[in-house]
Image (cartoon, rainbow, N blue to C red):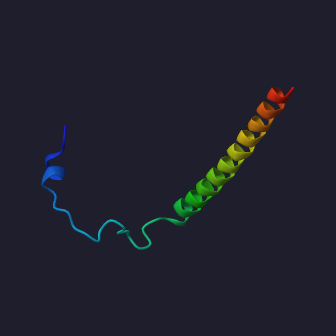
Amino acid sequence: MTNKFVEEALYHSGYEGAVFKDGASHLATESDQFRKSNARYLRFANVIVDFCASQQNKLHFAK
């Protein structure tokens, strides 16, 4: 099911990165930065867990 307006909309190059200047509140910006920081920490934690799991597998097979 498609929207009629979407089907009829013309493509305008140059609007892909368009944003509203000062459109986000300070709280929303701070929340977004906090979310990105936490995601970075979680990705790094996953790398550590994967590394430890791979080292345990190597030790297990070496016995």
Q: Is residue 20 above or below residue 35?
A: below
Query: Quarter holding the N terminus?
Result: top left
Residue, far bottom:
21
Q: Give percent across and percent down for residue 41.
A: 69, 52
Give me the residue at 62% from left, 51% from top.
39
Query: Quarter holding the C terminus?
Result: top right
Depth check, front residue: 32 or 26: 32
- Horizontal side of residue 61 vs 5, given as left or right: right
- Horizontal side of residue 42 vs 30, given as left or right: right
Depth check, front residue: 35 or 43: 43
Residue, far right:
63
Q: Is residue 4 above or below residue 22?
A: above
Residue, far front:
62
Q: Give percent across and percent down for residue 8.
A: 12, 54
Q: Give percent across and percent down for residue 61.
A: 80, 27
- Quadrant of res 32: bottom right
Give me the residue at 29% from left, 68% from top.
15
Depth check, front residue: 39 or 43: 43
Depth check, front residue: 52 or 13: 52
Give me the residue at 52% from left, 60% from top.
28
Q: How many marks?
A: 0
Q: Is residue 6 above or below residue 51?
A: below
- Horizontal side of residue 22 vs 13, given as left or right: right
Give me the residue at 44% from left, 72% from top.
22
